[in-house]
Amino acid sequence: MAKNSNINSRTVVGPIAAFVMAGLLFVYSRTSIKAAKRNAERHRSADGGQISWRNEHLRRHGMLKRPEDDASLGQLVRSANDQASNAVGKGQARLEGDEILRAKQRKPGVNN
């Protein structure tokens, strides 16, 4: 290699960092735009085809129920948690390690 080589950590890391930041900005902007469109569509359908600013105001201040989205990830997680808590409360759901843990608690001197 020549003595005046222009390749060092600064010349390599700078463009890589810029490329990664540009990629993150692109993904973030696309995701936020899609989420805003989906949210507007959900509110529009709840208001009968057109966004009602009065209903939107009432929703934001807790005076009107927010529209529910059937396919949102948060709703799926909440429903799964509710089902699991209901099943545990009724004694129906058992995890794989529950029986082993209970056996160890009954026999304090046993190590597996």
Image (tube, rainbow, N blue to C red):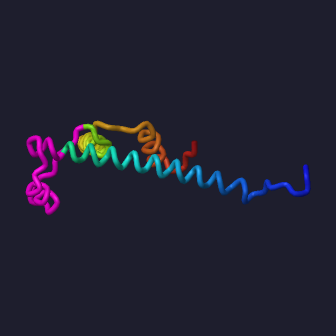
Q: Is residue 46 magenta?
A: yes
Q: Is residue 30 left or right of residue 91?
A: right
Q: Position of residue 13 (x, y in %)?
A: 68, 55
52 lies above or below 100: below
Going 45% across and 40% down the picture, which residue do you hit?
A: 97
List x then y, in percent, for residue 88. Answer: 29, 43
In the rendered image, residue 103, in percent from the top left (x then y), is placed at 45, 42
Q: What is the residue that sits farthest to the bottom in this orientation?
A: 61
- The residue positioned 80% from the left and 55% from the top of the image is 6
Left or right, 56 with reference to 5: left
**Residue 36: image location, x then y, percent:** 29, 48
- Residue under the image location 41 percent in, 41 percent down: 98
Q: Quadrant of residue 68?
A: top left
Task: Give 34 or 65, whichever is nearer the viewer.
Answer: 34
The image quadrant of residue 112 is: top right
Report the magenta residues as a range. 43-70
Tell me what residue is drawn at x 24 percent, y 43 percent.
86
Does residue 57 show up magenta in the picture? yes
